[in-house]
Image: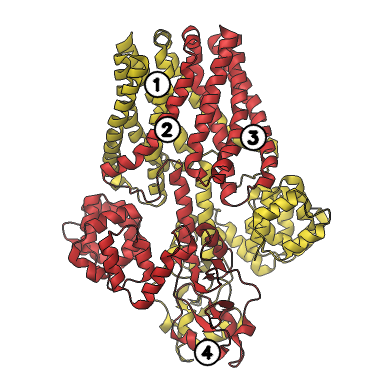
Chain colours: A red, B yellow
């Protein structure tokens, strides 16, 4: 069994293994590449580089492939130039595609030179698709036979080597077009002379190379098969997408969503250099600063009112917060629905009606609660009424914004998981402040 | 190929298929259960029930199994009692476990009665584990042989039936303890009389029934195998975890994280009844209201200052927003690291130092920018200085809180993805307001 990651991190960080790197390397020798990649990501840069140096060259490629881009690039930048020839010794097209964005141009060229002609062809085919299309991530280790092959030939093929996560043989015609899929398990009971085509599945989902990675991956996950064929626009077989790659792509999708909600990307390194990390995050802070200044500008319109009724300034965060929270609940639900294809123009109206009703119910309840609290706090019935109306108005507006902001962003091909919440809270902040201070100006002066 | 989900949703919602349900049912007949489940989740309740009524009884169980709890429960509540006998006709232990939380007690009992004795045993075994442990979700369709079996017996077993996502035979000793795993592909080249044990894998990761679902699923995803054996504390084979179940569990984990960030759970229905949805969300609004009032209370301490320097009230949102954003960036990074086991007591110190440095750099930059803007806006150099210092202080405090809030929550076994952000913004709001208004009181009065 693997030593739990946290224990090993502790031993390395606290140097409890002593100065002798041999013990550590012996421990790592028994671990798979995913484990080593995760360990390296968890170490401060100095320790990370020390461990990296000790990893045998013939494992370095596989470890790099499993890492996130940011921590990976630190290792790449610190690998002596003379090591690369041995690191690239067994590289294939898929490895190179995985590392493509992390390697400097000259190393990409060097790796490309190490590929044989078949792998070069795969590499060129894949780079015709951008990395958000599944054609970029095709697996070429597959079992392929001509459409007229018999069970005998199928069994012969199986005896050679079965790739990981491969439970079927693909049949192609003479032009290389996909024609059918035969499950390996169906060969066990069949006579040698039977045509494979007669054993093939009735209906098989094929994936188009230009399909979106997330949608294609979900198709594989729900197919019940270990992999699905990927074809180009002429139905020519490009390769396959297996469940492991599909899972990795789906995991990445979700991680990207989680990180995007804070304006970061999924490759962010726990221990990235300070300058790089500060730069990555500065943009998001800057965008949010603009929206905060916008909200301030609206507040500034009511300076006179605030001067006379300072209680309004005290209660401003309550109005903004309730709108922001209510809106983000609707937003989160809609963003998920959009990602799953469950929110469409057809059901948008029904969704909006439902969210407005939910907003209405919660708006009334919390408006009353807050109104009563404000009344007792400042012993001012009019102030209670003003905040009560402002909260109700803002929660209902938040429901509307929570539906429309992500839908419009999605239409504009902007990821609503990234920019949805900053736009939403800008709307709820401004609506909340203007409603609250505006009503205050009308009723309290 | 499947008709795209959005198109079908539109046809149903707009009634463009006409009043005749036969067309729709013919369309659905060619679709898998995941597709139908997703369609039902996307429909307003009335349409959802109409479509549900038309689905053949022998498919209803499989559709229910694929749905989220909230939309599923609406269907269960609206299924006539006399249908359940036929719906449960082919139910097995895994289906019942999946539906367990959604079914009323009397239907659980009825379904349990339909299980044969083997399935009842599986069901009882599984319910000994809570649903956050992998033992609850074990797959019992597996290939098992005694440890002394030969290749001949292996091939005979394969000829009968190979379950989905199963690429190996498990060997067990006489007490049912797991002893080895043989890849099916290794049987093709072997002689009939060879012992299966001699063909088995050198080292295989076994999963403990009490293991956390997420960790176990990640082990399967990275194993390179279609499934891993699950054993109890005495190494007795309970069943296996295959890549499809693992992917579903991982997807659920991520979805839970995304929904938790808005105080909802992953079973939230797009079209849940208004009362239910309002109730689900009210708690989160209430918690956030308490924290907003807390922030207001701190602002209230400076009423006198606000009355004299109304510009402070205008700029308050800027201070709060910058702290909240900077803190949530750190928080998001740490929450991910905790979920992956990459953040540990050993590297916490190094992480804190790095985050403080990043906070320091961004703090200085944005403090200067905001100070200058405030100076020109209100032509008040002292005000510029006050907000400059408050921003710097708040961004650095946000970095500290971003590291410590999730780590402490994790120690207390509270999900930091759920409660991390509300606690964090409470801290940054209060620190920001107190620093800003406190400095304002010192320097501007």
Of badges 1 and 3, the one in the foreground is 1
Judging depth in this view, the residue of A243 and B102 nearest the camera is A243
Crowding at label 2, few (<14), some or many (≥20) Cα neighbours within 10 Å? Answer: many
Reading the image, the residue beneath label 4 is A153
Reading the image, the residue beneath label 3 is B279
- Residue B293: image location, x then y, percent: 50, 22
Reading the image, the residue beneath label 1 is B433
- Residue B291: image location, x then y, percent: 48, 26
Of badges 4 and 2, the one in the foreground is 2
Reading the image, the residue beneath label 2 is A288
- Residue B247: image location, x then y, percent: 52, 60
Query: Could you confirm whether marks 1 and 4 are on the same chain?
Result: no
The CA span between labels 1 and 2 is 18 Å
Mark sitting earlier along the chain (1/3):
3
Q: Please tell me the numbered disc located at residue B33.
A: none
Judging depth in this view, the residue of B199 and B432 nearest the camera is B432
Q: Are marks 4 and 2 in contact (CB under 8 Å)?
A: no
Q: Are marks 4 and 3 in contact (CB under 8 Å)?
A: no
């Amino acid at each position: 069994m693997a030593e739990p990651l946290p224990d090993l991190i502790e031993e390395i960080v606290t140097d409890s293994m002593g100065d002798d790197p041999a013990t550590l390397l012996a421990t790592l020798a028994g671990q798979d590449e995913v484990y080593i990649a995760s360990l390296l990501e968890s170490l401060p840069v100095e320790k990370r580089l020390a461990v990296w140096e000790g990893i045998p060259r013939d494992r370095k490629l596989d470890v790099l492939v499993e890492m996130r881009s940011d921590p990976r690039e630190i290792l790449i930048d610190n690998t002596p130039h003379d090591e690369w020839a041995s690191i690239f010794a067994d590289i294939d097209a898929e490895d190179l595609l995985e590392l493509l964005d992390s390697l400097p141009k000259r190393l990409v060229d060097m790796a490309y030179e190490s590929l044989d002609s078949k792998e070069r062809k795969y590499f060129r085919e894949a780079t015709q698709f951008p990395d958000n299309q599944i054609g970029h991530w095709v697996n070429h280790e597959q079992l392929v036979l001509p459409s007229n092959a018999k069970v005998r030939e199928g069994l012969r093929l199986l005896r050679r080597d079965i790739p990981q996560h491969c439970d079927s043989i693909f049949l192609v015609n003479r032009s290389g077009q996909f024609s059918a899929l035969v499950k390996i398990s169906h060969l066990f009971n069949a006579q040698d002379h039977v045509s494979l085509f007669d054993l093939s599945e009735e209906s098989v989902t094929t994936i188009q190379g230009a399909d979106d990675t997330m949608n294609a991956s979900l198709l594989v996950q729900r197919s019940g098969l270990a992999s699905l064929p990927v074809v180009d626009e002429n139905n020519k077989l490009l390769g396959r997408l297996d469940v492991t790659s599909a899972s990795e792509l789906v995991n990445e999708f979700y991680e990207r969503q989680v990180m995007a909600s804070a304006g970061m990307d999924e490759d962010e390194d726990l221990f990235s250099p300070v300058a790089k990390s500060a730069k990555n995050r500065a943009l998001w802070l800057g965008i949010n600063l603009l929206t905060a200044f916008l909200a301030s500008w609206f507040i500034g319109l009511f300076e006179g009112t605030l001067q006379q009724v300072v209680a309004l300034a005290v209660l401003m965060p309550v109005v903004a917060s309730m709108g922001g929270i209510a809106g983000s609940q609707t937003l989160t639900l809609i963003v998920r629905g959009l990602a799953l294809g469950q929110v469409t123009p057809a059901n948008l109206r029904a969704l909006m009606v439902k969210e407005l009703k939910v907003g209405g119910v919660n708006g009334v309840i919390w408006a009353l609660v807050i109104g009563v609290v404000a009344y007792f706090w400042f012993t001012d019935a009019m102030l209670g009424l003003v905040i009560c109306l402002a909260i109700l108005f803002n929660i209902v507006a938040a429901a509307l914004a929570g539906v429309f902001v992500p839908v419009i962003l999605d239409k504009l091909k902007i990821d609503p998981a990234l920019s949805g919440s900053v736009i939403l809270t800008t709307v709820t902040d401004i609506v909340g402040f203007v409603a609250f201070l505006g009503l205050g100006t009308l009723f309290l002066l």
